[in-house]
Amino acid sequence: MKKQNFLKKILSTSVLSLALLSTLHAAPKEQKYIIATASTGGTFYPVGVGIATIASLKLAKDHKMTFSAISSAGSGENIDMMEKGEVNFSIIQALFGSMAWQGKAKYADAPKKNLRSISMLWQNVEQFVVTNEIAKSGNIMDMTNLYGKKFAIGGRGSGTLVSGESILGALGIDIAKMDMQYLGYGPSSTAMQDGKIDGMNIPSGIPTSAITNAYATIGADKIKHLEFSDANIAQIAESYPVWTRFVIPKETYPGQKAAINTIAQPNLLVVTADTPEETVYLLTKTMYENLAFLNTVHKATKAMDIKKAIDGLPMPLHSGAAKYYKEQGIAIPQRLIAE
């Protein structure tokens, strides 16, 4: 009897030891993260997919981290999803980031202090494309010729919509007098090709597929980008000084024979403050150590440079991103250090 009890104790101890060893050596739980982008016809989506792809390839095996990108209505919806905890990462316009962090405009009295910056990515180029009948002078003030006509200003809840409203409002152009169409980039391009709208607002990295398709199908002799003067820029920048001069090189789009003088603002990769430091550090490191791959995804990423990573950020850096930049010898100003 004593021998049996002794054997039972040994067996129980062995089972317990094996269970503990199994727990200690169990594979760490996979961490899955989502990057919110914008409509598939713009630049946010393909770049987001590129970042998610390279991060998953590099971090899945050793760090058990995977990333995926989803399309959305853009900056506005992305900030809402981050606030609700539906996504950790997103690409947004600097204008939206500035509004959200400061608690201005649509975020009046409700600043989004849960947001943290990771990096400036590339310039978001404002592209107001209209038919030649609307472009009498070729300047942005020709938008008044759209009064009573159909204009696609972007999807509801999108950064495109808000940036368009901010720019036109600053110039005294009354969008309420237009027949507004709330369409994403692809549908806007299709509607213009079908003659259902007279203009569209497509802020994006260049070249933008939705605009390329429109120029190729309609013809560069029938549609045109509206341009901005220095006076226009000064007027627009009074409220949110995020826009600067941007020149779209000639031949960026089919049949485009001359450079286009427009404006741009930075696009940002942002994250929620509670996302683990190690996750953000590894994503930032992977992104900048694999720029060659991202450059094959979209030409807009060729503007990405670690030396410009913290330029124009409207909110503090996440500690994980700050850790990587410090390792690279980048001096971080006090305003970008999170409390």
Image (cartoon, grey):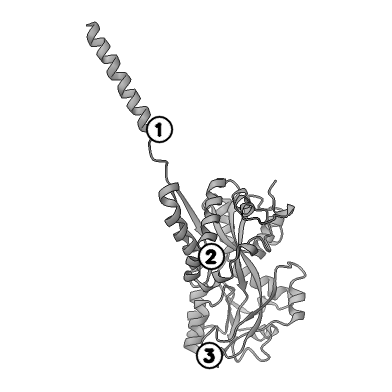
Look at the picture and state if 230 lies above or below 239.
below
Q: Earlier in the sequence, mark 1 or mark 3?
A: 1
Q: Which element carries disc 3, helix, strand or loop? A: loop
Q: Residue 314 appears in which quarter of the rendering?
A: bottom right
Q: Which residue is denoted by mark 2 in the rendering?
A: 73
Q: CA distance from mark 1 to mark 2?
A: 43 Å
Outermost residue toward the bottom in this view: 221
Look at the picture and state if 309 lies above or below 277.
below
Of the residues tagged 1 and 3, which is closer to the observer?
1
In-front residue for pair 265/80: 265
Q: CA distance from mark 1 to mark 3?
A: 63 Å
Q: Residue 9 appears in which quarter of the rendering?
A: top left
Place of residue 259 in the rendered image (x, y in percent of width and height, measured from the top left): 62, 86
Outermost residue toward the top in this view: 2
Q: Amino acid at mark 3?
A: Gly
Q: Which residue is denoted by mark 1 in the rendering?
A: 24
Look at the picture and state if 82 lies above or below 143.
above
Q: How many marks?
A: 3
Of the residues tagged 3 and 2, which is closer to the observer?
3
Q: Earlier in the sequence, mark 1 or mark 2?
A: 1
Q: Earlier in the sequence, mark 3 or mark 2?
A: 2
Q: Residue 91 appears in which quarter of the rendering?
A: bottom right
User: Is residue 206 visible to the viewer in this orientation of the structure?
Assistant: yes
Q: Quadrant of the N terminus?
A: top left
Place of residue 190 in the rendered image (x, y in percent of width and height, measured from the top left): 47, 80
Give the numbered dot on residue 255. 3
Q: Amino acid at mark 1?
A: Leu
